[in-house]
Image: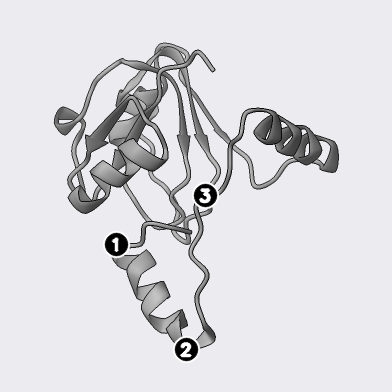
Amino acid sequence: MGANVTAFTSSASKVDGIKKTLQADEVVLVPRGGKPSDMITATFDIIIDTASTEHNVEPYIHSLKPEGVFCMVGLPNQKIIIDPYDLLNNKTIAGSQIGSIAECKELLQFCAEHDISSDVKIISPQELGSAFEALETGTACNR
């Protein structure tokens, strides 16, 4: 679709799967609790953060170009801390929990036209405990 896509993960075991199934152009391995110096600086126009657990957003904001947008669509259960200086150069922090019905229809139509599908794992009720543990530890490959 014309954009270069970079995926971020804290799990080395997910890198190959992300490249293959999500067709990311590049995968950046971010150490847990990574610092801005551990990542790419001033590279991205937009970052869509899908993580729903507590994490440090500072390295991602540092990775934005001037006028870049950091959009959180995950809903962490903790407050995020942002240094006001990270917003210099007209960087924007945005969030979205869900779109309207019209936007959802438009998104689904776009996905159908471009053969984009979800990567999911169906589990039994007995597997719920281990599934939550995998989400909390970052070892889950699906959501």
Q: Are marks 1 and 2 in contact (CB under 8 Å)?
A: no
Mark 1 is surrounded, within 10 Å at the Cα level, by few (under 14), some (14 to 19) or many (20 or more) other residues, namely some
Where disc 1 sits, the SS reads loop
The amino acid type, in three-letter code, at marker 1 is: Thr
Image point (53%, 53%), residue name:
75
The amino acid type, in three-letter code, at marker 2 is: Gln
x and y percentages locating residue 137 in the rendered image: 29, 65
Give the CA distance from mark 3 to mark 2: 26 Å
Badge 1 or badge 2: first in the primary sequence: 2
Which of 84/80 is in front?
80
Give the CA distance from mark 1 to mark 3: 17 Å
Which of 44/122 is in front?
122
x and y percentages locating residue 118 in the rendered image: 56, 48
Give the CA distance from mark 1 to mark 2: 18 Å
The numbered mark at residue 126 is 2
Report the residue that reaches farthest toward the right: 102
Residue 57 seen in the current view: no
Image point (38%, 44%), residue name:
81
Q: Nearer the viewer, mark 1 or mark 3?
A: 1
Mark 2 is surrounded, within 10 Å at the Cα level, by few (under 14), some (14 to 19) or many (20 or more) other residues, namely few
Badge 1 or badge 3: first in the primary sequence: 3
In the rendered view, how is the structure colored?
Answer: one colour
Which of 136/64 is in front?
136
Mark 3 — residue? 74
Image point (33%, 24%), residue name:
25
Mark 1 — residue? 139
Where disc 3 sits, the SS reads loop
Figure quadrant of residue 115: top right
Image point (29%, 62%), residue name:
139
Residue 61 versus residue 10 in the image, above or below: above
Mark 3 is surrounded, within 10 Å at the Cα level, by few (under 14), some (14 to 19) or many (20 or more) other residues, namely some
Where disc 2 sits, the SS reads helix
